[in-house]
Image: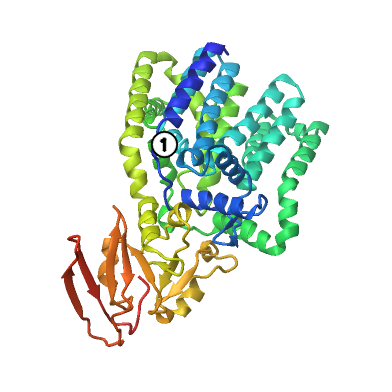
Amino acid sequence: MRRKDVFSLAVAGLLLYMLGNWALPITDPVESNYAETAKEMIAAGDYVSPRIFGNYWYDKPILFYLELIGSFHLFGMTDFAARFFPAVFAVAGILMTYGFAARLYDRRTGLLSAVLLGVSVEYWYLGHAIITDMTLFVTVSASLMSFYAGYESGRVRYYYLAFAAAALAVLDKGPIGLALPGLVILIFLLWQRRLSMLCSIHMLGGLALFLVMTGLWYVPMYLLHGSDFLDTFLGVHNVLRATVSEHPRNNVWYYYLLVFLAGFFPWSLVVVPSCLRRLAKREVHLPSGERERFLLVWSVSVFVAFECMASKYMTYTFPYMMPLAVLMGRFFLGHETMFWRMAKGMGAAYLIALLTILPLATRNNSGQDIAKVLEQQSRPDTVVLTYGIRYPVSIAYYSSLCPQRLVATQADIEKARPHKMSWTATNIMPFASSETMDRRADTLLVTDREHVKELGLKVPGYWKEVGSSSNYVVYRLDAEVPYDGHEEMTGRKSEASHGILETYLSGNRKNPQIP
């Protein structure tokens, strides 16, 4: 490792992952959950129990929320602050890849591996995303790197570092933070016929350190919340996720192959054809060296483990990118001219995207703009509803409002409420029903253009458009126009003073349907 290399990679990484982050609004549906949870934890002064919409939220452990809280305290509650730690961990992952590959092989391999990883599409995306996966990537990688350093050198301190890193991974995303490195180490030691290493006193000492570190949060959470915490966190978000597909359309055998091809773009366009040619010529064989065996076991174990899980997400196999980047770095040693041209081209494309396309894309998937409209139109007693759209948590984050998700009946609310060992456990947003809606209250409703025609039909009352953004429309319930519940649809139109067409709709509340 050379200081010049480390400095150059760090500067390039900071430019690639932090430049323009202040112009990227927090998006729905995933990023906003984390940001809103951290915001509510700060407001409550509770840095132990994650919460959202006033409810305790057992989706993920505490580490990533603490990163957000710390960043909000440093930089204020801004978009840059929310994206700060994912960017920092992305740069750390690049430097770790350089150091690990240089230790295993040489400086050139380290440089190529780090750059290859840093400009891969999936890594670049997750380096900006406000989710737990970049932290998991770094902590799991640190755990496996530390283990191999201890295995190769015989220095026991590395085993303790491996368990400490695994503990941070478990505090970031749950049991998978130990299960992944544990599976890789187990298979590798079986292959090397050194399984007895697991019984050494230092492994037991490392396990004790792991239990102490994870117990700092898990034990208080169990004492505070008891079986609710275990049933939801372990039962729904771990056991159920592994056994019942949350998104069945993704549960196909080739899903992660597509993720690999897209995630490692542009490198997969070169490496995959080369591997297929070698396979056709029968030039592929299992590695005999310890380093290659460890890298192969690491990457294949992660891929197979998540292939066997019922729920499939694009980010699940992300931890295999570290060893694959090193192996691909070795491949590109014989094609360095092409490699650096591709790397420079991708780097330039990312910088252009950060300043042009990405701000528009994130804004179109965020409730930031419509939150401003709602705050301008609302009063202290205004009821805010959402209808026919994926619940936009970012509205709550960017405003002082807490929208309610509108469904047809009270029975529908009961069906949608959180239940044990069911995917409804994620439905902790507030609900309201059309049949019990107070039509005398000042009410704002957020929907999209597609569901506007249902206002007055499936959502009774007279509605007036009062604002919009690129992806949402806001309507106000006109309580002054009497609604008698008749089945026929009536309407009237008038030109507003500012030139916008105001449309009033009434409709049928008989046999209401959930959109």
Is residue 113 visible in the rendered image? The answer is no
Q: Quadrant of the N terminus?
A: top right
Is residue 267 visible in the rendered image? The answer is yes
Asked if residue 172 is positioned above or below residue 443 in the image, the reply reads above
Q: What kind of residue is marked 1?
A: Gly
Q: Is residue 36 left or right of residue 386?
A: right
Question: Which residue is depicted at the point 50% across and 29% down?
Answer: 324
Q: In front here: 395 or 146?
A: 395
Tell me if mark 1 has few (under 14), some (14-19) or many (20+) residues whose alpha carbon lies within 10 angstroms of its own: many
- Residue lying at the far right of the rendered structure: 201
Which of the 4 image quadrants contains residue 194? top right
Image x and y of residue 473, in percent: 30, 61
Image x and y of residue 391, in percent: 42, 60
Which of the 4 image quadrants contains residue 229? bottom right
Q: Quadrant of the C terminus?
A: bottom left
Q: Is residue 424 left or right of residue 440?
A: right
Identify the residue under disc 1. 263
Q: In front here: 313 or 335?
A: 313
Question: Which residue is depicted at the point 44% across and 43% down?
Answer: 256
Question: Which residue is depicted at the point 48% across and 21% down?
Answer: 11
Image x and y of residue 291, in percent: 60, 23
Please count the marks in the image. 1
Q: Secondary structure at mark 1?
A: helix
Asked if residue 124 is positioned above or below residue 449 in the image, the reply reads above
